[in-house]
Amino acid sequence: QKEVEQDPGPLSVPEGAIVSLNCTYSNSAFQYFMWYRQYSRKGPELLMYTYSSGNKEDGRFTAQVDKSSKYISLFIRDSQPSDSATYLCAIGTQGAQKLVFGQGTRLTINP
Amino acid sequence: DTGVSQDPRHKITKRGQNVTFRCDPISEHNRLYWYRQTLGQGPEFLTYFQNEAQLEKSRLLSDRFSAERPKGSFSTLEIQRTEQGDSAMYLCASSTSRFSNQPQHFGDGTRLSIL
């Protein structure tokens, strides 16, 4: 079993839709959680990071963490064609520097 | 631009050759990381430095791989006797230890193609 599981998609939605992206993880030692966006032939770009259960909002993006279920989500409201990219969840343990990434979900927003 | 810089962006080489990649981190970041990403997969951790000290290495980092950060600033990743399976995107990231659990910021990677 992989430490972090992420549905690779692809996911295709119309412009303006609410998008939900999810990851599950197996190690309860994981303490901090990140979402990165990656455009083709570019490096991952940090979108959100959080260390606690609950919701964290930044503009159109909301990150949600449920440590009891070992489940994290990223919601994108009012999705735009420019949001079309691969979204990666990344998880780390307290004090450790290695990030464990999900496989990435390829998202397309159709105009 | 004060982001993480990687050079070259793309390297094509024949099997068996040695290659070296360079990473320049964000200037105030003392931690530097190398990851490898293959098509359709998330990045996989290879190694990490705090200042000039290499503090962790993945089992993925075989004896053919070596990374250095001699002055605690830029880093190099060398692959000796390249193999077909080394074809991947090599990503560098940096962060600061000034505050705990700071996120890692990535460069745009070096894409390695082995002929």
Image: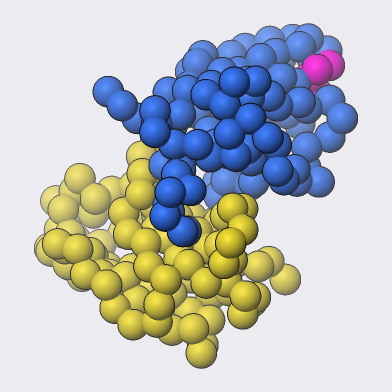
Chain colours: A yellow, B blue
In the image, residue B21 above or below residue B63: above
What x and y, as percent, mark residue B57?
A: 75, 43
Q: Does the magenta stretch mainly form a helix, a strand or a loop?
A: loop
Q: Residue at x 38, y 73 (%)?
A: A73
Quarter of the rendering containing residue B2: top left
Quarter of the rendering containing residue B21: top right
Viewer-side residue, B79 vs B50: B50
In the image, residue A5 above or below residue B67: below
What x and y, as percent, mark residue B11?
A: 59, 14
Side (left or right) of A77 relative to A30: left
Residue B112 visible in the shown view: no
Q: Which image quarter holds the N terminus of chain A?
A: bottom right
Viewer-side residue, A12 vs B23: B23
In the image, residue B114 above or below residue A7: above
Furthest-right residue in view? B63
**In the image, which residues are magenta?**
B80-84
